[in-house]
Image (tube, helix red, strand yellow):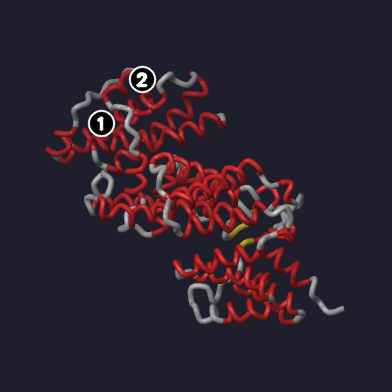
């Protein structure tokens, strides 16, 4: 299958699923039917050509698969409520794009995102269901992205769909008084998807470009649906500004290259310009939130011509504001880096000492890595070496292990 067809199918997946769920309900059955339709397209379109009305083709195929499935269930269980929903006859004729007329061209992607990120679901289930239902990824692709068994992902998706069915969660935008909180969950899920792609938590790769691209695509789609929302714009800007570093994050051998040592000529200038414009407009027009502040920090980094020219006092001021509005130990750890640049390593070590009692981060390898960096800045080479070694043991990312072990090796006596 060509990359162009794959991208197009992922764009269409949520609109097709939204159309079916809006008409029939039965989220779990509709999602299965859409996956079958996507599979049919991947095998038929490269041979017979793409139809004029691609969305209509997919809806027609999926609706007939769904109709057939629900009719079988109805015959077996004699469920009158299912019988009543069957108002579209099943035939064996080829898909007719004209069938799309009766569905309308409404885009239910935002509603679908809210449903997949329903608060009754666990975070892993929200991630898996969002990538499957909204992103159009297969179970195998999701499993590969997160380096977990395919059966595990399948179970998460199955449980998520069962939970939605058991809760009778409606396919509708949440009430106005719940919408902002639910949108916050959607943004967090997209943030997690991007972060896992950009800094893969385990395995042999530094990053997963397919996963970051999917997160950016979904964030762009969300921004088109709610263009005036500051935090949506902030998250998209953060993703763009961060992903601009990707070409310089690894060396020719695949080894991790830290930000200060990256060749900034390799950074994507187009993504930087787009991200800076987006966050500048957002900060000027909407109330400030944590994603916007993180994007503003990223913009300061990206606009510096070299690591030495980075405006660390401005970054520290932004982190001070970010820390006041979010109780996040990782924010505090990142702020410590700015503290070290502005006030010296001793002040930064005082900051991370206060994090050692926080169980959310006390055993995280990045705390030890930061400690090693500050100790090295302070001239305590033996303690820095020990900290880097602890960090290397704690991370499950092979490239990070190699980088941290290299930092420790450079500090050996003699």
Q: Which mark is residue 243?
A: none
Extreme residue in the front direction: 284
User: Which residue is found at the position 52% from the left and 24% from the top?
Assistant: 46
User: Percent position (x, y) of residue 393?
Assistant: 64, 72
Left or right: residue 97 compared with residue 219: left
In the rendered image, which quarter contains the N terminus? Answer: top right
Q: Secondary structure at mark 1?
A: helix
User: Which residue is found at the position 59% from the left and 67% from the top?
Assistant: 316
Q: Quadrant of residue 317?
A: bottom right
Asked if residue 155 shows in the view, the reply is no
Left or right: residue 405 compared with residue 391: right
Label 1 with label 2: CB-CB less than 8 Å: no
For mark 2, does the 10 Å Cα neighbourhood hold few (<14), some (14 to 19), or many (20 or more) residues? Answer: some
Q: Nearer the viewer, mark 1 or mark 2?
A: 2
Q: Quadrant of residue 202?
A: bottom right
User: Percent position (x, y) of residue 258?
Assistant: 70, 60
In the rendered image, which quarter contains the C terminus? Answer: bottom right
Q: What residue would you read off at disc 1?
A: 67
User: Percent position (x, y) of residue 297?
Assistant: 58, 58
Choose between 231 and 7: the one closer to the eye. Answer: 231
Extreme residue in the right direction: 414
Q: Secondary structure at mark 2?
A: helix
Q: What residue would you read off at disc 2?
A: 97
* Labels 1 and 2: the sequence-earlier one: 1
User: Which residue is found at the position 36% from the left and 20% from the top?
Assistant: 97
Choose between 64 and 123: the one closer to the eye. Answer: 123
Asked if residue 174 shows in the view, the reply is yes
Choose between 205 and 12: the one closer to the eye. Answer: 12
């Amino acid at each position: 299958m060509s990359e162009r067809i794959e991208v197009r199918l992922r764009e269409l997946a949520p609109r097709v699923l939204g159309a079916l769920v809006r008409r029939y309900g039965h989220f779990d059955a509709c999602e299965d039917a859409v996956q079958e339709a996507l599979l049919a397209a991947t095998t038929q379109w490269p041979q017979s050509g793409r139809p004029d009305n691609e969305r209509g083709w997919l809806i027609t195929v999926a609706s007939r698969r769904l109709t057939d499935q629900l009719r079988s269930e109805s015959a077996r269980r004699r469920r009158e409520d299912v019988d009543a929903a069957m108002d579209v006859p099943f035939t064996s004729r080829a898909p007719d794009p004209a069938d799309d007329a009766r569905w309308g061209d409404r885009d239910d992607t935002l509603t679908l995102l809210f449903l997949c990120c329903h608060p009754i679901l666990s975070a892993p289930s929200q991630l898996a269901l969002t990538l499957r239902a909204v992103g159009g990824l297969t179970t195998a692709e999701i499993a590969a992205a997160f380096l977990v068994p395919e059966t595990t992902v399948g179970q998460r998706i199955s449980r998520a769909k069962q939970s939605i069915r058991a809760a009778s969660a409606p396919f509708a935008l949440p009430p106005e008084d719940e919408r902002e909180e639910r949108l916050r969950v959607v943004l967090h899920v997209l943030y997690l998807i991007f972060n896992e792609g950009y800094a893969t938590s385990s395995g042999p790769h530094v990053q997963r470009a397919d996963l970051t691209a999917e997160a950016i695509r979904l964030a762009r789609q969300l921004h088109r649906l709610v263009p005036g929302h500051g935090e949506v714009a902030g998250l998209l800007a953060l993703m763009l500004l961060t992903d601009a570093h990707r070409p310089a994050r690894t060396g020719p051998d695949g080894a991790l290259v830290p930000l200060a040592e990256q060749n900034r000529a390799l950074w994507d200038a187009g993504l930087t310009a787009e991200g800076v414009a987006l966050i500048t407009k957002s900060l000027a027009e909407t109330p400030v939130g944590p994603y916007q502040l993180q994007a503003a920090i990223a913009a300061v980094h990206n606009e510096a011509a070299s690591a030495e020219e980075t405006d660390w006092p401005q970054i520290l001021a932004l982190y001070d504001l970010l820390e006041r509005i979010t109780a996040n130990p990782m924010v505090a750890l990142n702020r410590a880096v700015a503290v070290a640049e502005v006030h010296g390593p001793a002040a930064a070590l005082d900051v991370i000492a206060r994090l050692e009692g926080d169980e959310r981060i006390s055993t995280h390898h990045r705390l030890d890595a930061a400690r090693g960096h500050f100790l090295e800045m302070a001239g305590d080479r033996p303690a820095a070496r020990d900290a880097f070694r602890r960090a290397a043991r704690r991370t499950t990312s092979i490239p990070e292990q190699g980088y941290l072990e290299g930092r420790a090796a450079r500090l050996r006596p003699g």
